[in-house]
Amino acid sequence: MQNTDTLEQILAQLTRLADTADARLAEERRTVGGDIDWSALAFRWRDDGRLQAISSPSAMPIDRLHGIDRQKDRLLANTRQFVAGAPANNALLWGSRGAGKSSLVKALLPEFVDQGLRIVEVPAHRLVDLPDLVAMLTDRPERFIVFSDDLSFEAGDGSYKALKAVLDGSLAAAPDNVLIYATSNRRHLLPEYQSENQAAQQVDGEIHHSEAVEEKISLSERFGLWLSFYPFDQANYLAIAAKHLTALGHDACIGEDAPWERAALRWALARGTRSGRTAEQFARDWAGQQQVR
């Protein structure tokens, strides 16, 4: 009996120590704002729960982004509303890899920085910290885009629930100066399995999805703006490569069967994709070779 009492006392003491440590960590996260260089234009949320200024944010000029004019116009309009203090939507950019999703988000910074726009990059595995981050940004005069790149969740990953709560579903109202822009190769952000679709039922001619499918759809539906990105055709791929070559100081004329065009097509064929990323990588390789020669 005495041993049982001792174990219970030890367990109670460990529980108190854990509660004290959690409270201290939460307090540190609330007060860390005093150490932040708020004059920075971009920030990174670190694994230790701190906001770190990025001294030289990477952003491609938005006029270098070719072949995604519709997506560009929609995101520019939404961001323009946001920085003006008008209603705007959280945005999900999904689709083919290398199509310019993350580049488009980053290109917003130089476009709207003079209007108070700032970008905070949050890795997917730290989305559990979103409530703490949003609380830190709420009373700031700047307008913040919380950016999570290449977002996806694996089966059993519960961190997406924090994202759902911040997007729409928490008792606390979302602040007016924070939006979430995310990019993903998956439309619903979570893996989809054939067995889940087979669990759907038909009732009076209507399809009722299984609970697993409904859960996945409910996450992406919390983004008010969906922008879809698709693979580029050959003409757009070459146009993107030409823009990058020109920016690197290389004269790139299209339609004259120039050597760089044939090289660009071979480059894409070797990688099995015609994407904006592939075009940029080719341009750097080609321009570098010409400069060395």
Image (spheres, rainbow, N blue to C red):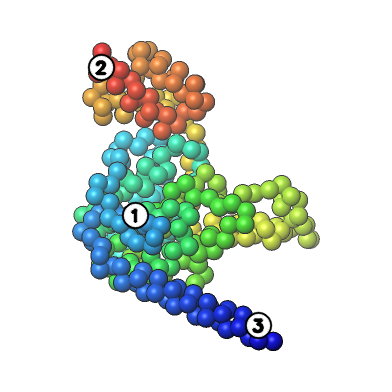
Q: Residue 3 carries which label?
A: 3
Instruction: Choose mark 1 or mark 3, whichever is in front.
Output: 3
At mark 3, the secondary structure is helix
- Closer to the chain start, of discs 2 and 3, is 3
Residue marked by disc 2: 292
Residue 43 image offset from top left, x and y in percent: 31, 55
At mark 1, the secondary structure is strand
Q: Which mark is residue 44?
A: 1
Circle 1 crowding by C-alpha within 10 Å: few under 14, some 14–19, many from 20: some
Q: Using the image, determine if residue 193 lies above or below residue 244.
A: below
Quarter of the figure with the C terminus: top left
User: In this view of the protein, can residue 235 be seen by the observer?
Assistant: yes
Instruction: Choose mark 2 or mark 3, whichever is in front.
Output: 3
The image quadrant of residue 176 is bottom left
Query: In front here: 228 or 178?
Result: 178
Residue at x 47% of width, y 28% of height: 274
Quarter of the figure with the N terminus: bottom right
Residue 285 image offset from top left, x and y in percent: 34, 23
Q: In this view, does 48 lie to the left or right of 170?
A: left
- Distance (Cα) linking label 1 and label 3: 49 Å
